[in-house]
Amino acid sequence: MDADAASAWRGTFVDATSPALTLDLGRVRDFGGLILQWSEAFASDYAIALSNDAHHWREIRRVRGGNGGRDWIALPESEARYLRLVLSGAPGTRYALADATVEPLAFAATPNDFIKSVAEDAPRGWYPRGFAGEQPYWTIVGIDGGDEQGLIGEDGAIESARGGFSIEPFVVSDGKLVTWADVKASQSLQDGYLPIPGVRWTHPDFDLAITAFAQGSRAQSQMVARYVLTNTGTQPRDCTLALALRPMQVNPPSQFLNTAGGISAIHALAMGLDDALVDGRARVRLIVVAGSAFAASFDAGMAVEHLVDANASLPSRVDDATGMASGAWRYPMHLAPGESREVSLVMSLTGDFPQERIDASAAQERVASQWRETLGKLDLRVPEQGRHLVDTLRTATAQMLISRKGPRLQPGTRSYARAWIRDGAMISEALLRTGHADVAGQFLRWYAPYQFDNGKVPCCVDDRGSDPVPENDSQGELLFTIAEVYRYTRDRKLLEVMWPHVLGAVAYMDALRASERNETNRTSNPAFFGLMPASISHEGYSAKPMHSYWDDFWALRGYDDAVRIAQWLGHDDEAKRFAAARDQFRDDLHASIAVATNRHGIDFIPGSAELGDFDATSTTIALAPGGEQGRLPQALLENTFERYWRGFVARRDGTRTWKDYTPYELRTIGAFVRLGWRDRAQEALDFFFADQQPRGWNQWAEVVSHTPRKPFFVGDLPHAWVASDYVRSVLDMFAYARDRDDALVIAAGIPADWLEGEGVTVAGLRTPYGSLGYTLRAGNGRVRLRLMPGTDVPPGGIVLQLPAALAGGKARIDGVASSWRDDGLHIDHLPADVVIQTR
């Protein structure tokens, strides 16, 4: 900006005696906008004009009803220009311009950048954390299998739908605006686990409780928000609850993948006393009619700027070319000491609003009852020290159900609103084990037909159809899912429908490994011989495809399950052919691991043949669901997870610098249980629980940062694939199917202190052999296990594995003495009553 031109603007006072007056700012380059500081309040129209040569002007921005204080104006231009301010008002209008600042291009490079710039100059709390340089956290609100989900933020803002506007609470108390920055906010779930999230504001003058839940069907669903304001003081209090409808998502600007977070443009807004029309569509209905309502264009100042002045004359409808329209409802209240008042509203997720008026309290109890039934199919009763573990398991199950879109299992609702077969396979296993076989079956029926004619299984399916990117774990994951659904449901008709998909997937895997089973690989790099070809299925290899053992362990699992499927259906010839291919592939895989470890001079199982890289989280697939634990070189296997444990302890104890990690590491909990590392599993869980954001919502994002308030990309929050890793690992603590001998191992991860007193009760835990139920408790010098009927005894029996301090004593099964084996106490019938003397 020209220095002389700048000074000509500052302190400028103009009496408008003609319809338009101009002030030339001068020559500028690479500018993103203006900040105009008016020292005398006014409400008028003006425009910004641009010229290449200071002679031929064109209007590039018109402001209607300026703010009267400080005006922020986004002007995304970058070439050298001349700028002019054109004032237009009634004759005699007095303008008092104190200052004008031309801002660099970054000031308004994007709408998100512009609001960040505005927020930087505003009081903290006027704008959400994500625009104010702080990383926020949130959780989903939705129904089981719905097409749309809302969000609620940790500070109480509620997002209406994917990419949609939000409603944010404010309180005016003693004439002062109270925002999220002025209170202590805490988060919770109803009953500690139901997907009915709440936020509580604690302030010296009041408490505000915010609750959100979803109801309805896939075709017609709504999100209900309840606000309860309580006077916690000893004197009566006049205050106002304000609910601002804002052109901003709860999903913050740091989120960029598939659904860009931050601004959600509103060009037309109509605020009624009991509803709101956003861009011409009815989106909000108030259950409690507001005392007043207004709308504001950005140029007149966003709604938050007008909340304190209840007498301000503002319209109820605005059009805003900037897409930054906002509005608010005000609820004036006179509250006696201890008195509470509730306000509630409904936002449409899918379909139209219901005809009948909603009773928010009754609706919440109805939704809570439905979720209790849905999540109560599995009943785990543990002592108080294990309550958070069980609550998180139930919540994680709900998160998987809410994140799906109809039959489409998805890892998320924003960044990852697509169906991957690998995510779906592991989510399906978690849902099968928690009693939701119908959901896993629906996913399988929906996904399998997307298989290509040559047998290739797409890695991903979304609204556009199948993704052709080759990711060579996909075939094994589909085969595993087909077999797993049958193991839990015994639905032979579905298995027969899936048989052509089995044949196609095996044929494609045969072709893939044949392409690597050649003399070139045998002589130049035998570590590649016979493996699945290099791919990017493991996201760590997205920059360059690798021969990932992740692919191979999934492929081996697929071959093994193909054999079982053929046997179940009586296709004996195919079963023999599949078994021969499986055995050959297993031999090639184990030979490759031996070559790779030797070539790279390592003593652990690597992530890929090329790199010899360490990736224990990926290697967990070899154990579960891979089933290779008993066949892998035991020294390499133990070294892999010992190395992981050493690194984990260093990170936990602060002796190793770290930036972030992905909670896919929760898979290691199941690996520790299967390795017999009961105490390590519990220590790792304690660490991961500390990184739940926020802990009261029982969830993890895809990425956890060492600096949790510094903005970063977190993926989806919650992340349903991470939730499935947690569920699968935690259920292993109570029972898991052991592949090497077809045994059912129970109690291998339950901490010793959980068994005291009432102990542990398991009911409705699904296994491939039926529904498992047992009670296990210790006290008075003995351990007692009662196994309930309902489960078929597997070929390898039921194996009880107790903490070391409680194992090995004299055991009686239904009064008959029984001996311990190296891997535990074997039980060959149900029901059974087991008593073990511990002293």
Image (tube, grey):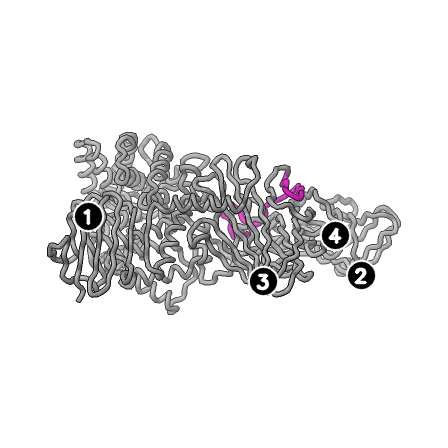
Give the structural element (helix, strand or loop) at label 4.
loop
Earlier-in-chain disc, 3 versus 1? 3
- 10 Å crowding of disc 3: few (<14), some (14-19), many (20+): many
Where are the magenta residues, as a range?
252-279
Q: Amino acid at mark 3?
A: Thr
Q: Please tell me whether residue 779 is drawn above or below residue 76 in the rendered image.
A: below
Q: Pointers 2 and 1 in contact (CB under 8 A)?
A: no
Q: Is residue 542 left or right of residue 502?
A: right
**Mark 2 Cα within 10 Å, few/some/many (few <14, many 20+)?**
some
Q: Residues within 10 Å of mark 4 (few under 14, many from 20)?
A: few
- Residue under numbered circle 3: 232
On whether residue 260 falls in the magenta region, the answer is yes
The three-letter code of the residue at mark 4 reads Ala
Residue 583 percent coordinates (x, y): 18, 42
Q: Is residue 52 visible?
A: no
Residue at 79% across, 46% down: 55
Q: Earlier in the sequence, mark 2 or mark 3?
A: 2
Q: Which residue is mark 4?
A: 312
Q: Are marks 3 and 4 in contact (CB under 8 Å)?
A: no
User: Mark 3 vs mark 4: which is more N-terminal?
Assistant: 3
| Vertical arrangement, residue 172 with respect to residue 793, above or below | below
Name the residue nearer the viewer: 579 or 746.
746
Q: Picture coordinates of residue 831 (x, y %)?
A: 19, 48
**Which mark sits nearer the N-terminus, 1 or 4?**
4
- Say which quadrant the N terminus sits in: bottom right
Looking at the rendered structure, the secondary structure element under dot 1 is loop
Compare marks 2 and 4 and give the one earlier in the sequence. Answer: 2
In three-dimensional space, the C-alpha distance between marks 3 and 1, rounded to whole angstroms, equals 55 Å
From the viewer's perspective, tell me whether residue 746 is left or right of residue 19.
Answer: left
- The CA span between labels 2 and 4 is 27 Å
**Residue that numbered label 2 is attached to:** 11
